[in-house]
Image (tube, rainbow, N blue to C red):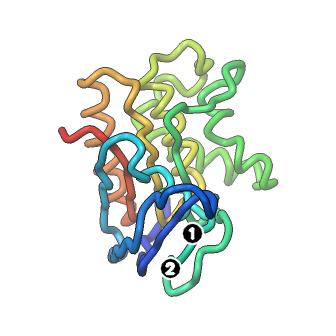
Amino acid sequence: MAARGVNIRIENLSHRYTSKSPVTFDRVNIEAEPGESLVIIGRSGCGKSTLLHIVAGLLAPTNGTLLLDDVQVRAPSSRWVMMFQAPHLFPWMTVTRNVGIGLHFANWPKREMQERVAEAIRLVNLEDYAHNNVQDLSGGQQQRVALARSLVMEPELLLLDEPFSALDAFTRTALQRDVRSIAKQLGINLMMVTHDID
């Protein structure tokens, strides 16, 4: 899979949901080079996920600037992909069909789609489960399917909103290590929020 990272520049970013609500966060500044990984850690309710939603283009900041490769983020893009806490898979579909669903709706040629999906499944070590229905997989395996579905789009930036928080400690640690390894292998940026200090 061909991928590359992105320059991230966040300047004086602030957010509040309404003019009467308290400030979610104030004047955040972050810079990251292509291929760099960032972990945003903090207690529940401190604005970690809100910041990630702004980076993903799902939410607008109140003030400040967010630039990816010197282009201001104003909307979602296939250049960056977000993984949420729940995998949100189609339980009646196989691993292969779940991973390729985005390419299918983007009308990719069948052969190219099959090659890209097979490579994404290999990256997350699920080759032996490619033809299994996802409802038959463990929680950790389902999150690997969600990760493969994110990677199949060859994003420059992978945003993780605590996708492993519901998993046991052993599985969570293994997935965090594997995600970092895959990001390094592909040269993409990784931005993850968590409240897990370990």
Asked whether disc 1 touches disc 2, contact meaning CB atoms under 8 Å apart, the reply is: yes
Residue situated in front as seen by the camera: 12 or 88 = 12
**Which image quadrant is residue 26 in?**
bottom left
Distance of mark 1 from mark 2, alpha carbons?
Answer: 7 Å
Residue at figure coordinates x 40%, y 25% from the top left: 166
Identity of the residue furthest to the front in this view: 20
What numbered label is drawn on residue 91? none
Asked whether 167 or 108 is in front, the reply is 167
Residue 168: x and y in percent read: 31, 21
Determine whether, in the image, residue 58 is placed left or right of residue 140: right
Q: Residues within 10 Å of mark 1 (few under 14, many from 20)?
A: many
Which residue is at the far bottom?
Answer: 70
The residue wearing badge 1 is 61
Image quadrant assignment for residue 187: bottom left
Left or right of residue 34, residue 18 in this image? right
x, y percent for residue 174? 27, 33
Tell me residue 40's x, y (percent).
32, 55
Return the x and y of residue 80 as percentages of the image width and height.
55, 62
Between 67 and 147, which is closer to the camera in this rendering? 67
**Amino acid residing under circle 2:** Gly
The residue depicted at 60 percent of the width and 74 percent of the height is 73
49 vs 77, left or right, is left
Q: Which residue in the protein does label 2 denote?
A: 64
